[in-house]
Image (cartoon, rainbow, N blue to C red):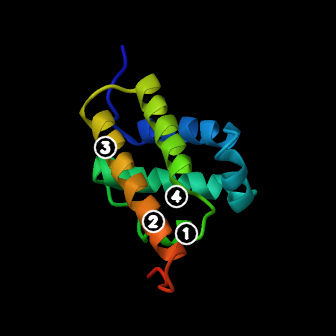
Amino acid sequence: MKKDIADIEDIKLLVNRFYDSVREDELLGPIFNDVIKDRWPEHLEKMYRFWQTVLLEEHTYHGSPFPPHAKLPVEKPHFERWINLFFATIDNHFDGELASEAKWRAQKMAEMFNYKIDYYRNSSATPIG
């Protein structure tokens, strides 16, 4: 029986398995691997802190998540794939209130990032970061 997300070890499992699938994905892998290069450990640590803050309300993440993504060469299909991989990772490992909240928050974040990237791509405005 699967359990809910409860602590930092669960966050690490979620983040590690999710990014394992992203790195191997034919659509997302080349983009993430090209941008992150050999800094995967640093990126994963940042993602642990982000999700620890969002889901466990343990405030370890500081910063704005959008600006590093503002100029990525991504569009709606990339975000749809990202969400599918994230949801599959949650469903494979967890079940419960925080697992559902993680999916909801990821969906909202993907929608917002997609909208904002599209906006900045078609505007002379610069993201605040």
Choose top left, top right, bottom left or bottom right for residue 11: top left
> Residue 98: percent from the left, percent from the top?
28, 37
Where disc 1 sits, the SS reads helix
Q: Give the residue furthest to the left.
A: 97
Q: Give the residue furthest to the top.
A: 1
Q: Which residue is mark 4?
A: 46
Which labelled disc corresponds to residue 4? none
Name which of mark 3 and mark 4 comes first in the sequence: 4
Q: Residue at x 61, y 42 (%)?
A: 22
Pick whichever, 85 or 77, lies toward us: 77
Q: Which residue is mark 3?
A: 104
Give the Cα separation between the discs numbered 1 and 3: 22 Å
Q: Which residue is mark 2?
A: 65
Q: In the rendered structure, which amino acid carries the disc numbered 2? A: Pro
Where disc 4 sits, the SS reads helix
Give the Cα separation between the discs numbered 3 and 4: 20 Å
Give the Cα separation between the discs numbered 2 and 3: 17 Å
Which labelled disc corresponds to residue 68? 1
For marks 2 and 3, give the one nearer the viewer. Answer: 3
Q: In the rendered structure, which amino acid carries the disc numbered 1? A: Pro
Crowd rating for badge 2 (residues with CA inside 10 Å; few <14, some 14–19, many 20+):
some
Q: Residue at x 52, y 58 (%)?
A: 46
> Residue 106: percent from the left, percent from the top?
39, 47
Give the Cα separation between the discs numbered 4 and 2: 10 Å
The vertical placement of 16 against 108, above or below, is above
Choose top left, top right, bottom left or bottom right for residue 87: top left
> Residue 75: percent from the left, percent from the top?
55, 56
